[in-house]
Image (cartoon, grey):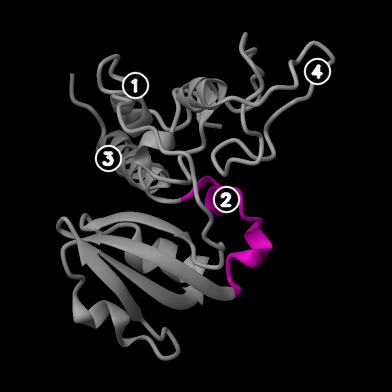
Amino acid sequence: MKIPSCILLFVLILAVSQTLQAQVKSTEHKTSPSLNKMPQGLAAKKIEYVITFRGEPLSKLFMEPGLNPRRIGCYSGMCFYRVFTSLDWINQNILPLDEVIFVEDGRRTAREERLIGSLDISTNRINVVHHRHPQWNGNGINTSLKENKPDTTDIDLRGRYISSPLAFSLVTDHATVMATMMAGGGNSWHLGKGAAWA
């Protein structure tokens, strides 16, 4: 049986469309959660961003007028730059590049964070789930932590803690580490991203 060419064309268009949609979605893991939640109307507004590149970026990337790129430094094969642009420009010109590791809001003020030096999310292949299925992030799901109180001002937990009359008032490092492993937002560094980071 011969398949009509219009059906073959439709199948081809559908396959290309799904591939392009998958490519767009696959860049979400390269942006901080606050950028993923940025309202559509603000995406055209120019603000400062910090971009982490694997190696030095191509100089032609920074030719846009007003971008004002400033190199922060290079460490362990990664280079960090501050740029002044819109999220729309970042989405079109930066995120699709293989050498781009991460983009975050550059207006954040630095503060000391509690780092987890030994968390290995590859043991349970959570890192694979984060990469292949970024939509499986725990968004809209509440979890309970049978622990002392975590540091709710920690940047990886801030704004996502639901107070309970059953909660103990003592804030401990262990509780903070457990909460980060479970649901840390990954804002301080990559080991601060928990299994259900949203």
Percent across and percent down for residue 81 are: 34, 71
User: Which residue is identified by label 4?
Assistant: 164
Contact (Cβ within 8 Å) of mark 3 with mark 1? no
Percent across and percent down for residue 43 are: 58, 65
Distance between the alpha carbons at the discs numbered 3 and 2:
36 Å
Mark 1 or mark 4, which is nearer the start of the sequence? 1
Mark 1 or mark 3, which is nearer the start of the sequence? 3
User: Which residue is identified by label 3?
Assistant: 12
Instruction: Say which of 121 and 141 sits in front.
Output: 121
Q: Amino acid at mark 1?
A: Ile
Mark 2 or mark 3, which is nearer the start of the sequence? 3
Question: Which disc number belongs to residue 25?
Answer: none
Q: Amino acid at mark 3?
A: Leu
Q: Which residues are magenta?
A: 32-45
User: Which residue is identified by label 1?
Assistant: 126
Q: Amino acid at mark 2?
A: Ser
Split into 4 quadrants, where in the image is the C terminus?
Answer: top right
Q: Decide whether residue 109 is among the magenta residues.
A: no
